[in-house]
Image (tube, rainbow, N blue to C red):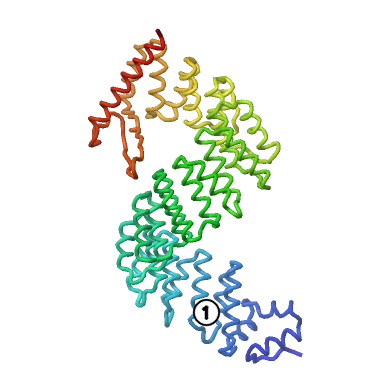
Amino acid sequence: MGIPLRITGIKTVYAIVKFTGRRNTVSLLHPQNGLGAYALFHMRKEDVLMLTKRISDYSLKGEVDYARTIFEEMSHPDTVSWNVMIRGYVENHRIGDARELFDKMPVRSSVSWNTMIMAYAKEGKTHIAMKLFIVMPDKDVVSWTAIITALSRGSHIEDAWRLFKLMPEPSSVSWASIISGFQQNGLAAETLCRFKEMLSVGVQPTSHSFTSALTASADLAMLSLSQQLYSQLLKRGFESNTHIGNSAISMFIKSGSFRNARRVLEDLPQPDIVTWNAMVVGYGQNGYGIEAIMSFHQMQKAKFLPDRVSFLGLLHGCSHCGYVEKGKQYFRSMESNYGISPGPEHYACMVDLLSRAGFLKEAHKLIKEMPFEPTCIFWRTLLNGCRIWGDLELGFYAANRILELDPYNSSACLMVIDIYASAGRWNEVLEMRRQMRKREARKELGCSWIEIKGRIHLFTTRDDTHPEADHIYLTLLLLSCDNAHNAHIVRN
């Protein structure tokens, strides 16, 4: 007995399941065979939902061509079916097919438009996303936010801000998007201005906008500003959010307030590995070796296994404090106890640790035995150690390796000049300076800053642009004379 030729709906499909068994039915109704196509074509309108789900399921499995076959066999696909099929193409990185289907849609909904706008934005094709946004008939908050996000990610933050100001009613998500855009484009002060503006118009900040503001405050390293921002965080009940807490810890550490950072850690109900790593790395990079080691062991007591970042912070702490044996022990334990293969960054920390402590030959040996080719940073670290400890021969060798890899490396040239000068080899100093001029090697301009009463004061080498420059240099001269006088008294 054959299977009936006319299949009229879902009830008939159930009958086939009963007659042939579930496994056989799946094979029979696969889009590759005619029966499946015939069944799908003749299904009633109320069955469209089930077919749409099958399109979604095939798309999620990556079988988007099968999904398209089902879609094509549907007699009356609704707008949801069209949107699901378009989304299936987008999620499988077939934006051309998605656009082809989008252009064929008889009636497009806001979901259709937003799916295409976000797809082009994700592909980095901001200009096409913008064209679609312009011609979109009924723009909603999702489409506005999507195009603003696209412009921000494409480094067109000024255009994003201009467009944002035209937005009828920005939501908290829209504000979070533009605030994040300023922060990701390195505009920390503007990020905080936008955050303050959002609060002033009565919009409730999201966790995402708070994270962006905290990161911007960390970049500015202004403690007073960090404390104000954290007060806002407490006021709005975000203190138990682990992700925000992690950003607050990094902010306080970069602002130099380890006590506040520690307090945030202790107040978090559910700290994670990122929380502990922020403490270990923060202590390590700022020269608090003992505290970095203590946090490392406290993390393990709290049942968190250290990862690559944990060890990086730990080795930084050992390097800054000269804990050579402890550093060696932790470095060896990475692979032997935790199964973590040290990366270039961990080897760089070890070379720095050994070079700072005067173990120059051991540092050189480690560089030569690394499982990858050394870059400039390794030789520069060794050269700095040679400069500190006066090893001319190894220092010249390291300098030559740097100049082979990067002939225009000014810092290496300056360290070599320092080594020559300390040895009294002035002819070589003049020759190196001549080579620097010939290569047009220039030293990057260094700068420092200090916060006084909420204002950042920035200084560069021989800077005379500050409005109080005359008074500053006079004070420095007085301090210098006072120190010289005190040193003379001590010697006598």
Answer with left or right where residue 404 lies relative to residue 41.
Answer: left
Location of the N terminus by quadrant is: bottom right
When the figure is inspected, residue 369 is found, relative to residue 58, above or below; the finding is above
At 31% from the left and 39% from the top, the residue drawn is: 457
| Residue 418 coordinates in the image, percent (x, y) | 39, 18
> Label 1 belongs to which residue?
81
At 55% from the left and 44% from the top, the residue drawn is: 262
When the figure is inspected, residue 487 is found, relative to residue 377, above or below; the finding is above
Q: Helix, strand or loop at disc 1? A: helix
Q: Which residue appears farthest toward the top when viewing the image?
A: 492
Location of the C terminus by quadrant is: top left
| Residue 321 coordinates in the image, percent (x, y) | 55, 28
Asked whether residue 153 appears in the rendered view, the answer is no
At 32% from the left and 60% from the top, the residue drawn is: 161
| Residue 148 coordinates in the image, percent (x, y) | 37, 63
Asked whether residue 100 appears in the rendered view, the answer is yes
